[in-house]
Image (spheres, helix red, strand yellow):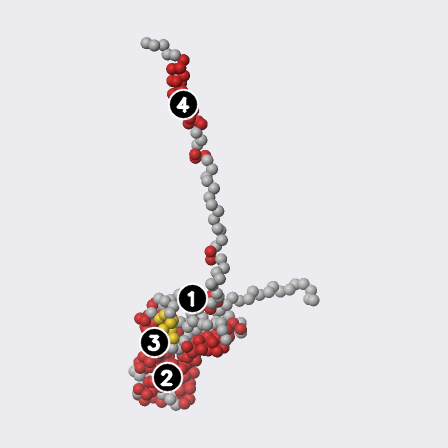
Amino acid sequence: MKKPTKAMLATAMLFLVGPTTMAQVQPDRSNLPDAPAPKQDQTNPAQKPDKNTRQTPMGLIAKKSFFYPELATTPGSLSSLQKFELFLDKSISPPQILSSAAGAGISEARGTLAGYGQGGEGFGKRFGSSMATGASSHFFGTFLLPAVLHDDPRYFVMLNGGFKARVGHALRRAVVIRTDDGRETFNLPGTLGPLLAEGLANTYLPDSERTAGKTFERYGIRIGFSAANNLLKEYWPTIFKRLRIGKVAPGFGPDKPRQPPRTGPPN
């Protein structure tokens, strides 16, 4: 057997020691710092000003109006259940109650609907029939037809603009309605609903009122009252905001912060 030379011993030493040495020289990647991440924009996109964005009435209305529950507070559409709830709210809203009470008093004073008689009983029957007709009108015009036709029965306040523009908007809304997807179309619920309600009223009104002529006469009065009521809806937020009666018409525009009382000496 050949005696190992110095070269062979050196080669064997490198073979045994090499892997250990390389492991010690090679850095541990788990201890290395992470690569620098690109800097992200921390700005909230919702806070970025958009030149195409303008303030709209929807941005000023925060709460549903107690007096006029049909005033729109959001631009989004209503579900069928929400339209049904709106029908219930309108049927017992203050305008409906006040108009029915006033109409019953005027009717008794003029002697119309004579079949109901006079006195407290006659007033009660007139008031009840008016409330019933109003509720059925809201049922057809606010819930049933809008749910079937996918129309939005709410009133969208223009809020900004001159007197003529706002009056024109209010009167136009008597014949034009907004659809669930934001388009405009003929106000079939607002025109057909009251007619169906007046036809249904012939089942409980006195016999003298159950004629075609009387039915269309009541229908015309109801349409005219609806158009005039739109004017009050249009200016309702403005009127009560200026009078500072926030509890009656809540949610229309941010209230001005109150100034703290002055404690220093007067000038």
Image quarter (top left, top right, bottom left or bottom right) of the C terminus: bottom right
On the image, numbered disc 1 is attached to which residue?
A: 74
**Residue 10: percent from left, percent from top:** 41, 16
Q: Nearer the viewer, residue 35 or 101?
A: 35
Measure how far apart labels 1 and 3 are at the Cα level. 22 Å
Amino acid identity at mark 3? Leu
Residue under the point 43% across and 34% down: 29
Helix, strand or loop at label 4? It is helix
Do the numbered discs 1 and 4 sit on residues whose CB atoms are within 8 Å? no
On the image, numbered disc 2 is attached to which residue?
A: 220
Residue under the point 43% across and 24% down: 21
Measure how far apart labels 2 and 4 are at the Cα level. 105 Å
Disc on the earlier residue, 1 or 3:
1
Do the numbered discs 3 and 2 sit on residues whose CB atoms are within 8 Å? no
Between circles 1 and 4, the one closer to the viewer is 4
**Residue 45: percent from left, percent from top:** 47, 56
Mark 2 Cα shell of 10 Å, populated few (<14), some (14-19), many (≥20): some
On the image, numbered disc 3 is attached to which residue?
A: 188
Give above or below for 267 relative to 117.
Answer: above
Amino acid identity at mark 4? Gly
Disc on the earlier residue, 1 or 2:
1
**Residue 144: percent from left, percent from top:** 32, 72
Measure how far apart labels 3 and 4 are at the Cα level. 92 Å
Residue under the point 48% across and 78% down: 164
Q: Quadrant of residue 151?
A: bottom left
Do the numbered discs 1 and 2 sit on residues whose CB atoms are within 8 Å? no
Helix, strand or loop at label 1? It is loop
Residue under the point 50% across and 68% down: 253
Q: Is residue 96 visible?
A: no
Disc on the earlier residue, 1 or 4:
4
Amino acid identity at mark 2? Gly
